[in-house]
Amino acid sequence: MNGLLEGLHAAQQGLRAGLHALGLAPEVHGQPAWPLDHRIAAEMLVVDAGHARRVLWSLACGGVALLVLVVSLPWRRARGPLWALAVALLVCAPWPQAHLLLAPAVPTSLHQSPTGFGATGMVRGQAVYQQHCVRCHGADGRGEGPDAPQLAQWPPNLNGALLWKRLDGELFWRVREGLHNRAGVLTMPGTGDALLDAQIWEVLDYLQAHAAGQMLRESGTWDRPVRLPGMAVSCRQGRARQARDLVGQRVRVAVAGQGAPWVADDPRWVTLVVGALPAGADAECQPQGGSDALAAAEQALALVLGVPVAQLPGYQLIVDRGGWLRARGQPGKAAWSEDDLVCRSTTTPAPVDGAAATSITTTPADGLQALIRRMDAEPVRLLRGGFPH
Ligand code: HEC
């Protein structure tokens, strides 16, 4: 299934790149446009297993039919029966329904956000939200802003999984161009040229970070994967200059400050300490930049954790090798356990061998070990609009 999604994604991106090279897909908003009215509806493949199976079988039948045709070319005597076989394969394939296969597309459907989920942009996005969106969507993003009751339609709650279900580029388009209901009535006005492209991407990052924090506050989990916000870092060893350079390694993020215990380096992960370090202390990695950048790093963590900045000291986060935030340690908590894994994979957990399993429950120090083992055994994947991201 994942292979199918990746293949379709690559095919679609490849088609766009090919059309762009031929001059048929000019750039819009900084990236090549998707010039067709429809795109592959990957989201349907994710939610409807029967449909996904039909697509796979049809692709297989089509592939075999093609192979049979190729074989028949030099093999003149068998050509008749082989062609009949190819036709039979195509007729008998369980072709999926077209309306499940394709979804309406916009020119920016395949655009990818260029922000890297960066902390400073996210904070700028928050300001944009306050200025342009809050009157309808409300300070908490639940859709209960002061202007909401007068609208043709109530704004949706942006704190659930909604944003994760959409493609980045389609959210961008909706915010810029606006939304209409089935009757053609404008339900949300687009920002048009009032916002720069970068500002729209940034406000979307803010919304996603905020939604992640609210999700964690309400359900105690991140149902959808959340990335470590991007920030400039400086590390004692190595050449990492950005948080994303640490992808591939496990990272433990600790927020220093009043009352937070000092987190020592540990060979199992890279330690990134955010916030004011105690005098004389030296962290393996720290955010870098002016006071704005440092404040943005804290604000971004506060957003994804769903807590005010003042309550941050003492929080810890564990980031897996894919750059996803996986576990949260709350201030004042003595030891880690598997319950701290707040972003879990939907795949079945890999069996843990007996010896290891007993050691998990015995000493608190092993709680973290068990958590890491489980995190590594169950990687998460982000699907946006059904496509791997
Ligand atoms: C005049 C009120 C209003 C303003 C201002 C407004 N929105 Fe909306 N927004 C709505 C309504 C109503 C909907 C639901 C429309 C629908 O589904 O047809 C919506 C839907 C959305 C959605 C969900 C789109 C989807 O894919 O379902 C997003 C995201 C969003 N708005 C973001 C923003 C952002 C970002 C801003 C500020 C730049 C903004 N909105 C400003 C009223 C507003």
Image: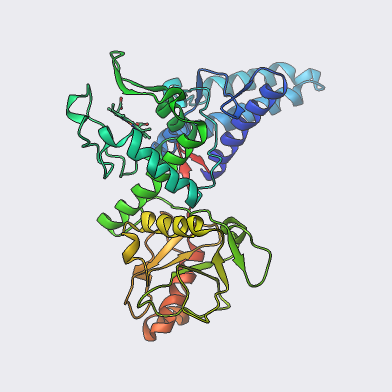
In this picture, is 94 found above or below 162? above
Ligand 1 rendered quadrant = top left
Number of numbered discs overlaid on the protein picture: 0
Report which quarter residue 97 is drawn in. top left
Q: Is residue 228 visible?
A: no
Report which quarter residue 81 is drawn in. top right
Q: Is residue 193 left or right of residue 248?
A: left
In front here: 20 or 29? 29
Q: Position of residue 292 (x, y in %)?
A: 48, 55
Q: Residue furthest right?
A: 74
Q: Position of residue 354 (x, y in %)?
A: 44, 79
Q: Position of residue 154 (x, y in %)?
A: 22, 29
Q: Position of residue 12 (x, y in %)?
A: 59, 30
In this picture, is 297 found above or below 370? above
* Residue plotted at (51% across, 28% down): 109
In this picture, is 43 found above or below 372? above
* Residue plotted at (37% across, 70% down): 313
In front here: 359 or 206? 206
* Residue plotted at (53% across, 82% down): 280
